[in-house]
Image (cartoon, rainbow, N blue to C red):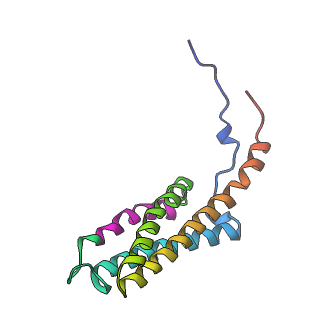
Amino acid sequence: MPVPDRPDLSASLPHYLPNAAPTAVRRARSVAVVSLLALIALCLAWELWLAPLRPGGSWLALKALPLCLPLAGFLKNRMYTYRWVSLMVWLYFTEGVVRGWSDPPPSNWLAWAEVLLCVVLFTACTAHIRLRLRKVPALAAAAPATL
C-alpha cells in the first residue's frame, strides 16, 4: 500500500545555530565543555601522577577514555550528547563518592574534586537541555498544523 506524501515539517523549522543561541545557553555549553575537559584531566592526572593505585600509574587511567567520546558532540552542539552525558556522569560521581569515603589522602581529596566536577557537568548539561528545549514549543506552534 503506498504511503501518501507528507509535507516535510522539518523544513519549516529554523536550524539551531549555536552562535545565535541566547547567552544562557552559550554559558551552559561553555561550562559543560570546561567541566568535561577538567574531569578528563583530573582522571588522567589522578591515576597516572598524583595518587595512582600503584607506583608509576595504573590501568585505572583508562576510565578517562569514555569521557573523551562526548567531546565531539559537545563541540558540534548535539542535544543527544548532552542527554546521555547527563546520565553517564553519575558513574563517575558514584566512583568519586566511594573513593572519597574509602581512600586515604590525597586520593580522597581528588575523589571529592571528581564529585564536584560531576555535579557541575550534570548541572550544565541539564541547564543546556532545558534552555534549548524552551524554544521547541514556540517553534512547533509556528509550524503549520497538518496531519
* Along the line of sight, the residue nearer the viewer: 122 or 38: 122
> Residue 118, percent across and down?
50, 71
Q: Is residue 117 above or below residue 138?
A: below
> Viewed as shown, does residue 6 lie left or right of 31?
right
**Residue sitting at x 70%, y 42%:** 12
> Residue 88, percent across and down?
46, 59
> Residue 80, percent across and down?
53, 53
Q: Is residue 23 above or below residue 13?
A: below
Q: Is residue 122 among the parts visible in the rendering?
A: yes
Magenta stretch: includes residue 91 = no
Residue 135 picture quarter: bottom right
Give the magenta part as a residue range.
61-76
Q: Main secondary structure of the magenta part?
A: helix
**Residue sitting at x 68%, y 64%:** 21
Q: Is residue 97 above or below residue 1?
A: below
> Residue 123, percent across and down?
60, 68
* Along the line of sight, the residue nearer the viewer: 126 or 105: 105
